[in-house]
Amino acid sequence: MNLAHWLERSACVGGDRPALMLGGEVVADYATFHARAAGLACALSEAGVAPGDRVGIFMKNCPDYLVVLFGIWIAGGVAVPINAKLHAREAAWILQDSGAGSAFVTPDLGPGLAEVTELPLTDVTGPEFAARIHGPGRAIAPRAPEDMAWLFYTSGTTGRPKGVEITHGMLMATSLAYPVDVDPVDPGDAAYYAAPMSHGAGIYAPIHVRMGCRHICPPSGGYDAGELLEIAAHHGPLSMFMAPTMVRRLTDAAKAAQTRGEGIKTIVYGGGPMYVADIAEAVDWFGPKFVQIYGQGECPMAITALSRSDVADRDHPRWRDRLASVGRAQSVVEVAIGDARGEALPPGMAGEIMVRGLPVMPGYWQNPEATDKTLRDGWLMTGDIGVLDADGYLILRDRSKDVIISGGTNIYPREVEEALLLHPSVHEVSVVGRPSEEWGEDVVAFVVAAPGHAVDPAALDAHCLDQIARFKRPKDYVVLTELPKNNYGKVLKTELRKAWEDRA
């Protein structure tokens, strides 16, 4: 079944319901949304796009993003959404690698991309696009669950990104797990696109289309905490996906404005480590509005979930341990911890997180070597280190490549980071290992000071000795004005290691 059937059904039963919005302005109801996507699909088919062909999307968040996405699906094509923060040359490489024959762009991104690719580009603000979406529509192309819908390119922090083949069946499994494991969806809700629609935020669009919700894009086209708080107050209830760094910024902005986030229904956070101190502060300020998910592009948004009640609970005797976890397995997957051979380990033992189920990818695009390395006997080997407790809560330690081995003992950077964030002078921190002739590796902490505070290494050292084992404490503290991050808000530990090497 083609995911686009969900849009068609919502248009049939609630065509006059508001669908696409730019801030507080309704730009299309569901009947119009469907008609525009079907018109675009007809134009794509007439231009030679056949089922299975790839079509690029290099756009900032805007209402027409969903028109393009569903138009590609109606035609039977495969969407290749590219993060709008990437350099034009990086976007061109993804288009080339995917074999896309054309791409849709927003006017701020089109000219730069046109300089580095000869592919036909359609500006969604131009007359050509307007003619396409207002033309005659076409029927939805039949698609099987195993047919690809979305070609997702990983962040590529350690080399060229890999294309993850995401099928219609995978997206349906993730979507149907959302109201069961993450958050119930009501037709009166609005999906707010604070994070890039090319990634997790866009993955959650189909279930909100199926339920006939509003889809609100911020007029700024990006994430502005003040703008979000203003729109939520007038057009809620809003549900949205955020990276942990965005939650941190929202909490800071709301405190400065003395607002409690009225109109925000749910913030689903994931995509990086959320520290206990940060989420505890956010819940204290906003109330029980947070749900955590853990997923990867290879199993999008659908490995585990930490429920709203678990995130907000302070009565359970192990609430802090649970808050430090990423929750329990979602309904559509199995989760296990494996040793070096992929054999399942008992609860309480650390190893590689493995997952299998309906949302797991069939493989990487034209990369059988990487596929064979990542998919083993039906299991997705995530590359993340974790522990399952007796109640099924998954504690995410670190990426396997980030574990520090000092004196033959594993040190998980996240544990050290969690401890340092409890100190009032620390706003952000990232911990990496540096080479040591004596121990193999030493722990180094890169720290961003909290506003109005100075970083005192001696005070932080004493604080660590009160919180964690002596051998885990940092041997050095490096004060930065900000941590290096990629386009998705993840801290670039490779850059920190290089910075240390340059410093040394």
Image (cartoon, grey):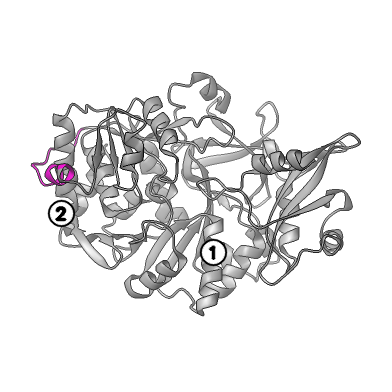
Residue 378 included in the magenta stretch of the image = no
Q: Helix or strand or loop: what does disc 1 sit on?
A: helix
The x and y percentages for residue 213 are 29, 60
Query: The residue under label 2 is which amino acid type?
Result: Thr
The x and y percentages for residue 209 are 28, 53
280 over 174 or under it: above or below: below
> Is residue 111 visible from the viewing direction of this image?
yes
Query: The residue under label 1 is which amino acid type?
Result: Arg
Mark 2 crowd level (few <14, some 14–19, many ≥20, 10 Å Cα): many
Judging depth in this view, the residue of 17 and 493 nearest the camera is 493
Per the image, the residue denoted by label 1 is 249
Judging depth in this view, the residue of 31 and 185 nearest the camera is 31
The x and y percentages for residue 34 are 18, 49
Q: Residue at x 38, y 57 (%)?
A: 193
409 over 232 or under it: above or below: above
- Report the number of discs: 2
The numbered mark, 2 or 1, whose residue comes first in the sequence reads 2
Looking at the image, the residue that sits furthest to the left is 136
In magenta, the rendered stretch is 128-141
Q: Which residue is drawn at 9% across and 43% down?
A: 135
Name the quarter where the N terminus is drawn. top left
The x and y percentages for residue 445 are 76, 51
> Is residue 351 visible from the viewing direction of this image?
no
Judging depth in this view, the residue of 370 and 310 nearest the camera is 370
Residue 135 included in the magenta stretch of the image = yes
Badge nearest the viewer, 2 or 1: 1
Mark 1 crowd level (few <14, some 14–19, many ≥20, 10 Å Cα): some
Q: Helix or strand or loop: what does disc 2 sit on?
A: helix
Per the image, the residue denoted by label 2 is 32
